[in-house]
Image: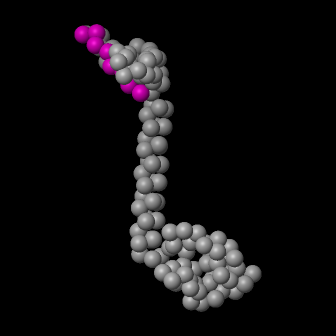
Amino acid sequence: MEYERVVYLEGGPGPNSDTLPAAPGMELYICPTCGRGELYLPQKALERRKKARREEEEDRAWLRDFQEKVKAGEIAPQLFLCPTCGNPRRDRTCPFCGSVVDLKTMEEICPGKPS
């Protein structure tokens, strides 16, 4: 396969359209023997797609981790105000004053140091 040029595809968004949807510039390679052509995403577009997939997977992993922590009672599903310092928090232990709360009853177990 030999590199020919970059091709920009244009298409209609309709369901009965016989053209391809709009796409970024595709690299066209043509076989010098049989004349068949193949289209490939440019390397930058491919890297962007890989990065987007990786970020989506990281987001899903964060959400799964968050949901597991909520089920385990390590963090609260909603933000609440710390009874000692008044800062919004979700964790059992306040990162600002050190107050500890039972997340099931939302009662303070160990007061923190007011700031």
Quadrant location, the N terminus: top left
**Would residue 2 be visible to someone looking at this image?**
no
Q: Is residue 84 left or right of residue 8?
A: right
- As drawn, 97 above or below 35: below
User: Residue 82, how many percent across, how many down?
Assistant: 64, 78
User: Which image quadrant is residue 37 in?
Assistant: top left
**Would residue 63 be visible to someone looking at this image?**
yes
Magenta-span inclusion, residue 12: no
Quadrant location, the C terminus: bottom right
Magenta-span inclusion, residue 39: yes
Magenta region, residue range: 34-41
Q: Is residue 86 left or right of residue 47?
A: right
In front of the other: 22 or 80: 80
In front of the other: 58 or 114: 114
In front of the other: 60 or 53: 60
Q: Residue at x 38, y 19 (%)?
A: 20
